Image (cartoon, rainbow, N blue to C red):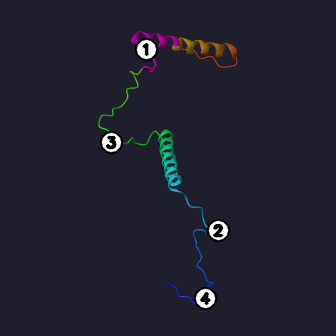
Amino acid sequence: PVVTSDPTSVARCYFHRASAPMQLSYEEAEEQSRILANAAALKKLAVDYGHPELPVVTSDPTSVARCYFHRASAPMQLSYEEAEEQSRILANAAALKKLAVDYGHPELPVVTSDP
């Protein structure tokens, strides 16, 4: 306690002075904490999206991995016959490309396989 004999001396209130920082009400503090929690969750999602190599942590024992081959949006898989036909078509296209390059560039050397 401060003892004074001067009746004109008064204490200075540091909370209500002009240069004091604004005080948040209870509702404003609650809203600020919700906003900061939402921002932290969004940052975590952004880091998870940007770094798929990071491990996934879960506490739910019933959560399972999703099968990317049997989902509705998965691309159709080729059968064995379709895959063989596709490889034949690609080989034929590569041979046609080689012939087109040989035809378009007669200055290239000719390689024969006949001894």
Q: Earlier in the sequence, mark 3 or mark 1?
A: 3
Between circles 2 and 3, the one closer to the viewer is: 2
Between circles 3 and 4, the one closer to the viewer is: 4
Q: Residue at x 55, y 58 (%)?
A: 24
The residue where tag 4 is placed is 6
Q: Earlier in the sequence, mark 2 or mark 3?
A: 2
What's the magenta region? 72-89
The residue where tag 2 is placed is 19
Spot occupied by residue 76 in the image (x, y as percentages of width and height): 44, 16
Q: Nearer the viewer, residue 82 or 96?
A: 82
Position of 26 with respect to 105 (left or right) is: left
Is residue 85 a member of the stretch shown in magenta? Answer: yes
Mark 3 lies on a secondary structure that is: loop
Q: Marks 3 and 1, how far apart in space?
A: 38 Å
The residue where tag 1 is placed is 78
Q: Is residue 18 above or below residue 64?
A: below
- Quadrant in the picture for residue 22: bottom right
Q: Residues within 10 Å of mark 4 (few under 14, many from 20)?
A: few
Mark 4 lies on a secondary structure that is: loop
Q: Marks 2 and 3, how far apart in space?
A: 48 Å
Mark 1 lies on a secondary structure that is: loop
Amino acid, disc 2: Ser
Is residue 79 a member of the stretch shown in magenta? Answer: yes
Q: Nearer the viewer, residue 17 or 98?
A: 17
Q: Earlier in the sequence, mark 4 or mark 2?
A: 4
